Image: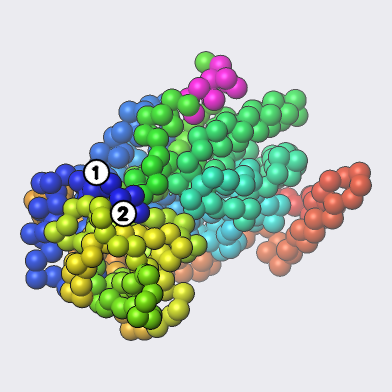
Amino acid sequence: MNDESNILDYISQEDLTGIRNFMEGKKTPFLIISLKQIEKNYDELVKNVPYAKVYYAVKANSENEVIKLLYKKGSNFDVATVFEMQQLFDLGVSPDRMSYGNTIKKEADIEFAYKNGIRLFASDSISDVYKLARKAPGAKVFFRILTEGGNADWPLSRKFGANPDMIYHLIVEAKRLGLEPYGLSFHVGSQQREIGQWDSAISQCKYLFDALKDEGIELKMINLGGGFPTNYVKPVQPLEVYAKEITRFLAEDFGDNFPEIIVEPGRSIAGDSGVMISEVVMVSKKSVLNQYGWVYIDVGKFGGLIETIDESIKYPIYIDGINSNKGGEEVILAGPTCDSMDILYEDYKYRLPESTKEGDKVFILSTGAYTTTYSSIYFNGFPPLKTYVVKDWENGEEVESGVGAKEKLGKEIRRSNSLRSACFRGAQTRFAPDREPRHSLHPTGVEPVTFGSEDQRSIQLS
Ligand SMILES: Cc1ncc(COP(=O)(O)O)c(C=O)c1O
């Protein structure tokens, strides 16, 4: 880690003092989420892309108080599962403020979403288009373009999306089946450090907008995804620079006449709202003359730091009371579980003060995103990451706490299946439910894709 870095590059002295007061007497590890920081990040995003509708990606941090705050501020929500939907419904979020952004969906889950009023869906496959046509008739659908995620610290890779030739066919088919092809989406990879990645994705959108216009289909929306960065060890441009560049790319392709623009930020909203407090469990060396010491702390890959896989995300890490690691020793950092993959950083050498010893408290910064939601359930018996949500770090006034802070709201918020089963009970499918389209994709030399048999093409929608 950069010798020169200082914890005060990431957090103010007042906030640091507040956190130190807050942590007194509390057992580590735990996470403290600051709503003030979430609000600041949201406001900054809206200021920089005022033309965009924000759909916060709930998967980044789904604490109730975070959702409630963002809802009050006018955010919409990108939900990945019926469980996220149910949580938001329980909190009073209306369905017109949600989009079902996961392209991998069970038909029953599409039905649940639709019956509960969600009308905006993502898709990237013919199978999914058929499911949507059956269970969400007339819904607005946006189609996800595949991107490679190059230069992202946490690339979402080739798992999602499809190439433009496939997207084109999906859209034509969706229209024929009575859906409303509404727009396009992409995700350039999370913590994307190369702004130009948006440029190529936006130009693919432009190409598809034009090609589909010739087919009589007018797309209306582009979903620019997430990918906006937060503050880790590797430096990134400020959000303002991202926004300016992306706005320029849009203007180059669409002139003054922007389509409706959606953004789906997760990490950039929640990332730097979290400070994790851990403790050094053990310090050791593997041989007497070994150059590197091992520092084992009480949180690791299974306690919420899974994004250290391949050392992808490098969190700023400091020992309590020592603001800078300048002059410290290079160490290997590992978590507390009995799994040997629970090593946080070995290739990339963090520096920690020479004086580092067992019992020292450790601050792990920018841990607000993809930590609570990734934390394992009782691996080795370790409980899920304890989380406190506070109004702000300085005063430390708690508004929610628990194992996954949602715990506090108890029954009301438990991911109940009651609504779900009520919805499914007696649910009549309007299309022969026993007939699954055989979504074989047989590329041939001439026809790039086959969309099943004639039978499937003539699915009746009324
Ligand atoms: C569909 C979708 N939208 C938005 C996001 C949020 O991305 P980020 O955290 O990079 O802002 C994700 C993250 O995985 C995603 O899968």
Measured from the top left, where is residue 401 in percent x and y?
A: 20, 64
Neighbours of disc 1 within 10 Å: few (<14), some (14-19), many (20+): few
In the structure shown, which secondary structural element does the residue marked by tag 1 occupy?
helix
**What's drawn in magenta, residue-wise?**
246-255
Q: Is residue 68 visible?
A: no
Q: What element carries label 2?
A: loop
For residue 346, which quarter of the picture? bottom left
The residue tagged 2 is 316
Residue that mark 1 sits on: 9
In-image side of 270 versus 144 (left or right)? left
The correct choice, above or below, for 286 with respect to 388 in the image is: below
Residue drawn at 84 percent across, 46 percent down:
448
Front residue of 277 and 444 = 277
Percent coordinates x, y for residue 122 in the rendering: 57, 47
Q: Where is 407 relative to 135, above or below?
A: below
Q: Tell me residue 289's x, y (percent).
A: 37, 77
Q: Residue lying farthest right?
A: 445
| Residue at the outermost front position | 289
Q: Answer left or right for 356 relative to 156.
A: left
